[in-house]
Amino acid sequence: MTIASDHVYRAMRDLVQSMDDTIPGKFEITKKGIVHDMMAPIGPHELTTLHLRKRLEKIMPEEIVAHTGEPDVEDEAEGIMRRPDVMVIALADMDVPGSFDPRTVIAAVEVVSRSNPENDWEDKMRDYPLIGIPVYAVFDPRTGTGAVLTDIHSTPDGPRYATRKDFVYGEDVTIADWTISTENLPLYKTTGTS
């Protein structure tokens, strides 16, 4: 990161931190700038996150957790700060001041937001391999489908995931070393147009 881009990133980070408790929604920083998901997560999003966390923690060893919430995952050198819906991480790697090191995250799990699906399907698919998160799982309550991406490799556009395994709700899905059911995960209700 150049001195100028480091300055810009720090300014964005200061802005995000100052707005975090005063403006509703979730803020993240990407190569493109600040992402603000203005919509508070709705029931199916939060319920999916809860189901995934509980299903993972039921089968993981005690020293590994499926963490939801803060702090962020941050790679200052890349100028990226993200907050996955679920982070699979060792308890020992959580005992740090400030943000988590993304290279300690075993897997990032995202539940697609109804208001900003491209953030999960495009932007995070680009950012997570760039900051070294080895497994990225996406669950999409709009369609009842998802994908698990693994095997980071170099490309002319930077690190990308080489392997993508798509799934439909109802199938078992493997995230890192753990296989969970996707049975009975909630879907967003479709809205009619007039």
Image (spheres, helix red, strand yellow):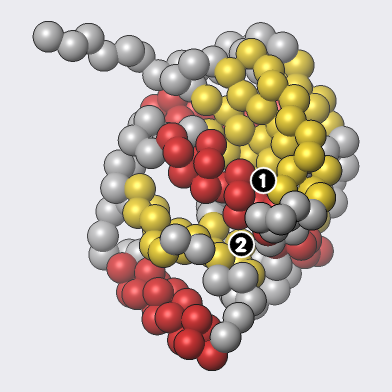
Give the CA separation, mark 2 to mark 1. 10 Å
- The amino acid beneath tag 1 is Ala
Q: Report x, y in % for residue 44.
A: 44, 24
Pick whichever, 50 or 80, lies toward us: 80
Q: Is residue 106 above or below residue 177?
A: below
Q: Report x, y in % for residue 171.
A: 72, 12
Residue 67 in view in this figure: no
Q: Which residue is at 61% across, 49% downward?
A: 126
- The amino acid beneath tag 2 is Val
In the picture, which quadrant includes the C terminus? top left
Mark 2 = which residue?
Answer: 73
In which quadrant of the rendered view does residue 16 lie? bottom left
Q: Which residue is at 46% across, 44% downward?
A: 119
In the structure shown, which secondary structural element does the residue marked by tag 1 occupy?
strand
Mark 1 = which residue?
Answer: 108
Pick whichever, 192 or 186, lies toward us: 192
Pick whichever, 185 or 62, lies toward us: 185
Q: Is residue 46 left or right of residue 99?
A: left
Q: Which residue is at 29% across, 47% downward?
A: 38
Q: Report x, y in % for residue 24.
A: 28, 53
Q: Earlier in the sequence, mark 2 or mark 1?
A: 2
